[in-house]
């Protein structure tokens, strides 16, 4: 395993995909601070550094999907995955070493994001508003989301043999998960009552409050909330949006995602017939 | 004889298609074993099974005497290298970086990289990325990668496919050098029979997933070289005559003898007639490796 990791990290250092992730992370961090700073200047309002620190989590899935399909996904087409098996590396170790490489890259990108936002953002926007303890919990959730995304996209890159299909499936899934999370959130946030306009007898517009037919029943709400909790994109929206939820349960959902996807991935990869 | 690789009734089935069936193969130590067969005969599937990329449906194989069912097979594989269809290289890395990568995967200190690159003729590639290499250079880099860790068994699947004549010569000379100077045993699958015949010491002819014949190059040469096939009524007298005249021969069947030298037919016939032996049939034969293979698999209809 250490041999594979040593080889993997050596390749990572020279990888253009890795370089692209780092550059994108730095540019995104600078852009977030700049856009918040310009909002602060334009509208003369207080902006919180916390937002810049956390907002990038919503696009983390797309970044990890792209990196994984470029870095791990080419192992089949380059024949290098085959080579590792031929020289006696176990399939489980190959899978786990790739997962660790993806996780390491994603966490490093996150650290770089936080460092850049802190370095540029603190002088411009001021310090952290959130209490440190709460920030630590959010960071834990943040790490959990990265682990879950990494497990999902490593799973795709290791069970599909075609580089192009890996890229398409990964990117579509990343956007798909984002869309699902957004849809579920819009349903969860729908108001219980809504204003309905109508014309009265004298022909004037009046408004009255009516029960929103799309308002979720308690049972539906529980199901939707559990789905949001379970999918990393849902968790990402919760973290980035600063929703009042029990952040302590999110890492458990992330852990479950990692265990489920890695477990299934290992099973499929160990059974997979390679060409 | 010590065998590096042996397969016993090896089989691989994909749904209703039998890609390999009851395949028995024996690769002696130090051999260059040519696995010969047309496209779809089961050569690459057989290699994939041996390399552990796929699991056999039936049968077993052993590498250096270790069966594929033995967990130790993983360690035994460290003594072998393989190139299946395309060389396993990172195209966005240099030849040197590819070798460093392989040393790390195997867990060896990165040493002798320069020597290894020079051995395969890639000593002067510098910072050139593998994606800019010619097909022949990539193939040689693939061999260099397979040589990391000093394996004593290399498997090459169609190593000259798509190469230009110069590339073919380079690969051929490299294989011969590694076999002769480093004692590496080779399993080479190919359907380029003429090319294979320049290096192979042993052959396994495969058709419809089965090895239909295993022969050494000496035996094959005997079978393929120009010969006169004689049918006689008295084999004993004929053999006496051939031995007395130091004419190379081989008794094929009871009354059929192959003679591997030009002889004076009239003199030969009269001499045998005097010893109460009649020559009933007389055929001059010469067989190419292609003809030999086609005859083996049952004639032109099968090709």
Image: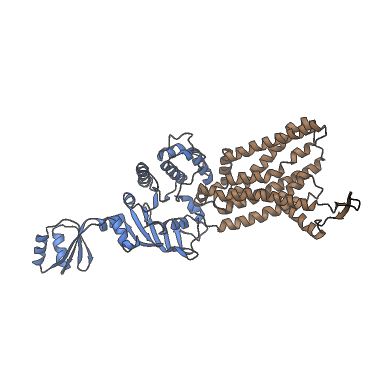
Residue B79 image position (x, y, % from top left) = 46, 50
Judge from the rendering whether residue A149 lies leftward or rightward of residue B213; answer left or right: right
The part of the image, by quadrant, that contains residue B136 is top left
Scheme of colours in the image? by chain
* Left or right placement of residue B228 versus residue A184 in this view: left
Q: What x and y, as percent, mark residue A67? A: 61, 44
On the image, the x and y values in percent for residue B45 come to: 45, 57
* Camera-side residue of A135 and A117: A117
Instruction: Give B212 or B238, whichever is nearer the viewer.
Output: B212
Residue placed at 44% from the left, 58% from the top? B46
Query: Which quadrant of the figure contains the N terminus of chain B?
Result: bottom left
- Left or right of residue B101: residue B219: left
Query: What is the letter of the brown chain?
Result: A
Q: How many numbered discs, if any?
A: 0
The colour one sees for chain B in the rendered image is blue
* Residue A7 in sight in this render: yes
What residue is at 11 percent from the left and 63 percent from the top? Answer: B269
Q: Position of residue A248 (x, y in %)?
A: 78, 50
Which residue is farthest right?
A202
Observer able to see residue A249: no
Instruction: Give the residue displayed 70% in from the left and 50% down from the top.
Output: A179
């Amino acid at each position: 395993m250490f041999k594979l990791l040593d080889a993997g990290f050596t390749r990572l250092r020279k990888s253009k995909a890795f370089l692209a992730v780092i550059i994108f992370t730095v540019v995104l961090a600078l852009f977030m601070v700049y856009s918040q700073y310009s909002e602060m200047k334009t509208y003369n309002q207080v902006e919180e550094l916390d937002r810049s620190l956390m907002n990038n989590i919503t696009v983390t899935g797309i970044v990890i999907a792209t990196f994984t399909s470029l870095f791990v996904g080419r192992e089949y087409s380059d024949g290098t995955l085959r080579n590792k098996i031929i020289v006696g590396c176990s399939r489980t170790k190959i899978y786990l070493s790739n997962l660790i490489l993806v996780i390491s890259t994603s966490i490093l990108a996150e650290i770089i994001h936080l460092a850049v936002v802190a370095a540029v953002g603190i002088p411009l926007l001021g310090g952290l508003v959130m209490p440190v303890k709460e920030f630590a919990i959010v960071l834990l959730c943040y790490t959990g989301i990265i682990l879950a995304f990494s497990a999902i996209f490593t799973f795709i890159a290791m069970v599909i043999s075609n580089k192009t299909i890996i890229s398409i499936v990964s990117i579509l899934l990343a956007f798909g998960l984002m869309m699902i999370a957004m849809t579920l959130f819009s349903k969860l946030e729908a108001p219980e009552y809504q204003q309905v306009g109508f014309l009265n007898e004298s022909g004037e517009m009046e408004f009255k409050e009516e029960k929103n037919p799309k308002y979720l029943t308690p049972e539906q709400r529980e199901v939707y909330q559990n789905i949001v909790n379970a999918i990393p994109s849902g968790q990402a929206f919760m973290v980035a949006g600063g929703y009042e939820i029990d952040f302590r349960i999110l890492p458990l959902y992330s852990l479950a995602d990692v265990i489920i996807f890695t477990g299934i991935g290992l099973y499929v990869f160990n059974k997979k017939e390679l060409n | 004889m010590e065998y590096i690789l042996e397969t016993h009734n090896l089989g691989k089935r994909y749904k209703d298609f039998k890609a390999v069936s009851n395949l028995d193969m024996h690769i002696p130590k130090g051999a260059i074993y040519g696995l010969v067969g047309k496209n779809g005969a089961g050569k690459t599937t057989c290699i994939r099974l041996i390399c552990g990329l796929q699991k056999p449906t039936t049968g077993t194989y052993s590498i250096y005497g270790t069966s594929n069912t033995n967990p130790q097979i993983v360690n035994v594989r460290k003594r072998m290298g393989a190139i299946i269809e395309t060389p396993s290289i990172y195209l966005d890395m240099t030849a040197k970086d590819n070798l460093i990568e392989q040393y790390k995967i195997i867990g060896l200190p990165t040493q002798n990289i320069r020597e290894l690159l020079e051995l395969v003729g890639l000593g002067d590639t510098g910072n050139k990325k593998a994606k800019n290499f010619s097909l022949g250079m990539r193939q040689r880099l693939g061999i260099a990668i397979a040589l990391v860790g000093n394996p004593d068994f290399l498997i090459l699947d169609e190593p000259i496919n798509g190469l230009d004549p110069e590339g073919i010569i380079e690969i051929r000379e490299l294989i011969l050098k590694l076999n002769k100077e480093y004692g590496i045993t080779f399993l080479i699958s190919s359907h380029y029979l003429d090319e294979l015949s320049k290096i192979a010491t042993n052959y396994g002819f495969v058709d419809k997933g089965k090895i239909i014949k295993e022969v050494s190059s000496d035996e094959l040469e005997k079978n393929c070289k120009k010969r006169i096939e004689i049918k006689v009524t008295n084999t004993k007298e004929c053999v006496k005559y051939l031995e007395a005249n130091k004419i190379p021969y081989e008794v094929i069947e009871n009354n059929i003898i192959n003679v591997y030298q030009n002889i004076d037919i009239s003199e030969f016939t009269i001499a045998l007639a005097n010893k109460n032996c009649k020559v009933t049939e007389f055929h001059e034969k010469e067989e190419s490796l292609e003809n030999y293979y086609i005859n083996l698999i049952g004639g032109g209809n099968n090709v």
